[in-house]
Image (cartoon, rainbow, N blue to C red):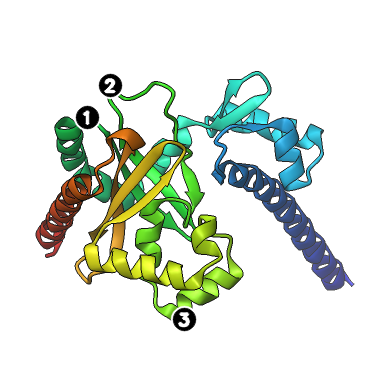
């Protein structure tokens, strides 16, 4: 009898712990749901947009945002609007893989900016998204220029660099299953898309245009030839010189690739 009571008590304690753990995971999961909402083309989100995207009631969103703001993962950008906080980005920058690429690329980004006075951007892929992880835009850049921190992979030239390296079957599966944000002239014409990606592989440079600015991007390669990151320039349309700017971006990206290889050789025992 006593043994049965102990066993029942142990089961009850286990169930209670499981329920408490499940509740904690639920709260944590909802917090991550909110954070995931900041990965679109609009870095600022309102309470209403967060409720719409997550399906959570306003009271829950308010409560979670208050905790995230207190911790520094989210910050208020304007009345009723929020954006990701710098503490979260500092943690992201501390990821060893990302930190190495950024640290190696930074001097070359500074040189490229000093040479051209155009915005220079370092990008990395995460799933079907492109992360704009670092940029140099000095005081001579237009004050109004702002970039989303995460965009669909096919929306800009650096993402096209990644798509150009995919095997054809993988590319077709991704086109069928994912929202890549390709411009209409590429999304609706597979032949033109494949031709564009082939040109990127041949020249080592991708170009995209839109909103009065052009992006010129080149791959930063790992030792095995895979794309580890991208280096880009963002140039107003009236100053865009695809050949000249493309050559400078390609040279800088190759220099970063060589420096990464040298860094890896030094780090190996």
Gap in Å between the C-alphas at discs 2 and 3?
Answer: 44 Å
Q: Where, by quadrant of the figure, is residue 42 drawn?
A: top right
Give residue 256's position: percent from left, percent from top. Answer: 17, 52
What kind of element bears circle 3? helix
Q: Point out the image quarter for the N terminus.
A: bottom right
Q: Are marks 1 and 2 in contact (CB under 8 Å)?
A: yes
Q: Residue furthest front?
A: 238
Q: Residues within 10 Å of mark 2 (few under 14, many from 20)?
A: few
Q: Earlier in the sequence, mark 1 or mark 2?
A: 1
- The image's mark for residue 117 is 1
Kindly identify the residue that appears in the image at 47 percent across and 38 percent down.
Answer: 211
- Label count reads 3
Q: Where, by quadrant of the figure, is residue 108 drawn?
A: top left
- The image's mark for residue 140 is 2
Q: Point out the image quarter for the C terminus.
A: bottom left
Q: Is residue 22 above or below residue 10?
A: above
For the residue pair 244 and 7, the one nearer the viewer reads as 244
Residue under label 3, please give it: 169
Give residue 125's position: percent from left, percent from top. Answer: 41, 56
Q: Where, by quadrant of the figure, is residue 114 drawn?
A: top left
Q: Are marks 3 and 1 in contact (CB under 8 Å)?
A: no
Q: Is residue 85 above or below residue 39?
A: above
For the residue pair 239 and 220, the one nearer the viewer reads as 239
């Amino acid at each position: 009898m006593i043994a049965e009571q102990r066993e029942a008590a142990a089961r009850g304690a286990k169930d209670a712990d499981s329920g408490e753990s499940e509740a904690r995971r639920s709260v944590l999961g909802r917090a991550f749901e909110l954070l995931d909402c900041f990965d679109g083309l609009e870095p600022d989100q309102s309470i209403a947009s967060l409720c719409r995207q997550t399906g959570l009631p306003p009271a829950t969103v308010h409560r979670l945002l208050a905790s995230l703001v207190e911790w520094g993962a989210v910050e208020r950008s304007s009345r009723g609007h929020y954006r990701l906080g710098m503490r979260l980005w500092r943690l992201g920058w501390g990821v060893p893989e990302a930190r190495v690429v950024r640290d190696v690329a930074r001097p070359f980004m500074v040189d490229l900016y000093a040479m051209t006075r155009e915005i220079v951007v370092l990008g990395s892929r995460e799933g079907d998204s492109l992360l704009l992880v670092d940029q140099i835009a000095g005081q001579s850049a237009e004050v109004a220029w702002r970039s989303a921190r995460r965009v669909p992979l096919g929306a800009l030239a650096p993402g096209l660099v990644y798509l150009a390296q995919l095997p054809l079957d993988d590319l077709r599966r991704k086109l069928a299953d994912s929202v890549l944000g390709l411009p209409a002239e590429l999304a609706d014409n597979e032949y033109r898309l494949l031709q564009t990606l082939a040109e990127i592989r041949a020249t080592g440079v991708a170009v995209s245009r839109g909103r009065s600015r052009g992006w010129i991007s080149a791959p930063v390669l790992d030792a095995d030839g895979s794309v580890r990151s991208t280096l880009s320039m963002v140039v107003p349309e009236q100053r865009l010189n695809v050949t000249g700017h493309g050559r400078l971006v390609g040279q800088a990206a190759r220099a970063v690739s060589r420096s990464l290889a040298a860094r890896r050789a030094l780090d190996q025992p």
